[in-house]
Every structure is written in structure tokens, then in C-alpha cells.
Image: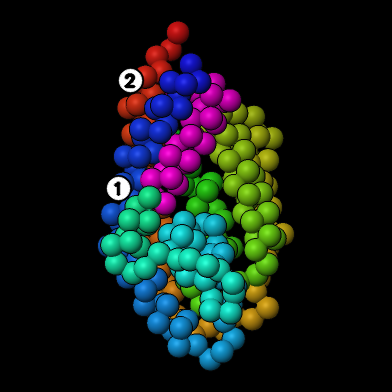
Amino acid sequence: MIGRVLLAALLAGIAAGLFYGAIQHVRLTPLILEAEKYENAGDGHSHDHAATATTTDTTAAQSAPAPADEEEGWAPADGTERTSFTFLASIVAGAGFAALLAGVSLLSGIRITPRNGVLWGIAGFLAVHLAPAASLPPELPGMPAGDLLLRQVWWVGTIAATGIAIWLFTQRTEMWAKVAAVVLVALPHIIGAPMPPTHESGVPAVISAAFAANTLAAAALLWIAIGGFLGLTMDRFVKEA
């Protein structure tokens, strides 16, 4: 049973990851490359964000090179090598998210089917990308960022709170569940995401805004693809006993 679920998640993740990689290559990589021009031509105070980009954006995290003053050894060269690693990272991310969605399905006892797969994907996007981005938007290389560990803790907490809220709102009919769902969605943003010591950046605001918008749009398409493909593969390989 578990093996068939993992196989279904892997196949769905590979298909969605290839789709996502193509979107990244067309819509996100050019913006990252443009931002790196400003980062490399900066005024001497580089930020650690380039090596540890916000986890809401797998593209920036895997594509951005490390700052020159950090002892990071290797980064993919521009061109074919970088494109190949972008697609590889997209496939890994797709498979990981598909496995996460399949695991939630098993724990909750709610099957993912061809009829509800897209809805599962939308729920995943809301919890993993949109909710954290409300307070911690996707960031380009060269942009200031808060402490990495604190951001990761806040990000994971926001995903967990939003995921539980979605379950409460969709699966429970009691009024307390609806109120609890609203509180859980709002709580991480009331606490607030870790902020950088300064918001000064050499990257033009128009590039940052375009990157954030395109990243969220690409993430939405990724999750819809994951949900759709996972519904098909779960229906094919994991039949209800």
C-alpha cells in the first residue's frame, strides 16, 4: 500500500516538476539573472540571502549563486548546466510536494481522486505558498532578508497552521471549527515573519514585484498539476480495498 502511494506520488511529482521547470525557465530565470546583475554590481554590502533564499521559492533557492564573500564552493554555470539543475530541482520539489499531499491524504483518510485532485492542489498552494507569502514574499538574490533559521521556523509553522485551518473549515461543520480556522490562518501573521534589519536593496522594485507575482503564479500551476496528476496516479495505482 505505502509503496504504491509512493510510486503514485513520484510519477505525479515528476510530471508536475517537468511542467514547473518549463515555467521557471521561461518566467522566473530571466528575472533572477536580471537581479543578479544588480547584486554583482552592488555597493559592497552583499547579503546572505543569495545562498539561502526564502523557502517559499524553490527557484531562487536553487538558482541563486552564493555571495562572493562566502566560502560556497560550487554553483551551476549559466546556460545548459543551470537549466538542467533548474529542471532537476523542480522535479525533486514536485515529487516532495506530491509525497506530502499523498501523506496528508493517508493521515486524513480522504482519498485523492481525479475528481478532487485539483482541489487538493489548490489547498496545497494556499498552505505552502500563498499563506506564507502574505508576510514573507518570494525574494530575489541581492535583496535583504531576516535570519534564515527564524524564517524557516515561521514558514513551517505557517504551513502547519494554514493546513489545519483548511481541514477544519472543509471537514468540520461546528461553529468552533470555523472560528478556530480563522484564528489559525491569522495567527502567524499576527506574530509576524522575521524581518531584515534593513529594506534597502539595489534590485529595482518593478523586478521584485514581477518576480513575486510570477513565482506565486508558477507555484499555483505547480500545485494544480500535482493535484491533478496525483489524482490520476492514485486512481491508477492505489485502489480502495
Colouring scheme applied when the structure was drawn: rainbow
Residue carrying label 2: 236
User: Residue 210 colored magenta?
Assistant: no
The answer to which of marks 2 and 1 sits earlier in the sequence is: 1
In this rendering, the count of numbered labels is: 2
Residue at screen point 36% across, 77% down: 34
Q: Main secondary structure of the magenta part?
A: helix
Which quarter of the image is occupied by the C terminus?
top left
Residue 205 lies in what quarter of the image? bottom left
Residue furthest bottom in the image: 43
Q: Amino acid at mark 1?
A: Phe
Q: Which residues are magenta?
A: 89-116
Separation (CA) of disc 2 from disc 1: 21 Å
Q: Is residue 233 above or below residue 79?
A: above
Residue at screen point 65% across, 74% down: 196
Residue carrying label 1: 19
